[in-house]
Amino acid sequence: MSESGGVDKGVVDKGVADGGVKESASPGASEVLDRIFAVIESRRQGDPATSHTARLFHKGTRKIAQKVGEEAVEVVIEAIRHRRDRLIEESADLMYHLMVLWADAKLAPADIWAELSRREGISGVAREAARDQKPGNDDR
């Protein structure tokens, strides 16, 4: 993780050169994310003058959430432009800021992995229909 807010280029797997899809990233994607998350947590009480991560924690949830939104928009823009290298870079930035938001909310990557595991094999359409059936769900 670079202190400029992005992920160090040496940490990011560049993917398949021909644009194909890997079944899983190497070395173990969840292990890489867990290591980056540990660095994020270690910066929680760091010096905001020298650490971008500490600066985000210092500014609070609203600023962290704003950064997640900004990075998500940048991901969308690069996807629409079909700029693969920039999409990879912006996706890494989004993942970093999302993990800062998780840490701020006292969540750990394992919490998200557990939810993804729970959803595995469940149709998104079926999941949304079940959610819509819950009493008091007027989010839509």
Image (tube, grey):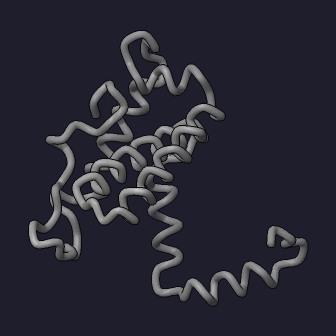
The quadrant in which residue 135 appears is bottom right
The quadrant in which residue 110 appears is bottom left
Q: Is residue 84 visible?
A: yes
Spot occupied by residue 91 in the image (x, y as percentages of width and height): 36, 53
Spot occupied by residue 120 in the image (x, y as percentages of width and height): 46, 80
**Residue pushed farthest left?**
17
Spot occupied by residue 98 in the image (x, y as percentages of width and height): 48, 46
Relative to residue 130, is residue 135 drawn left or right?
right
Q: In percent of the image, x 71 and y 87: which residue is there?
A: 129
Q: Please identify the quadrant where the N terminus is shown.
A: top left
Relative to residue 10, is residue 80 drawn left or right?
right
**Residue pushed farthest front?**
81
Q: Please identify the quadrant where the C terminus is shown.
A: bottom right
Most foreground residue, 130 or 84: 84
Picture mark count? 0
Judge whether 89 appears above or below 104 on screen. Answer: below
Q: In percent of the image, x 39 and y 26: which residue is there?
A: 42
The quadrant in which residue 27 appears is bottom left
Q: In percent of the image, x 40 and y 33: which residue is there?
A: 40
Q: Is residue 31 visible?
A: no
**Residue pushed farthest right?**
136
Most foreground residue, 122 or 83: 83
Judge whether 6 appears above or below 86 on screen. Answer: above
Judge whether 107 appears above or below 47 on screen. Answer: below
Relative to residue 19, is residue 124 drawn left or right?
right
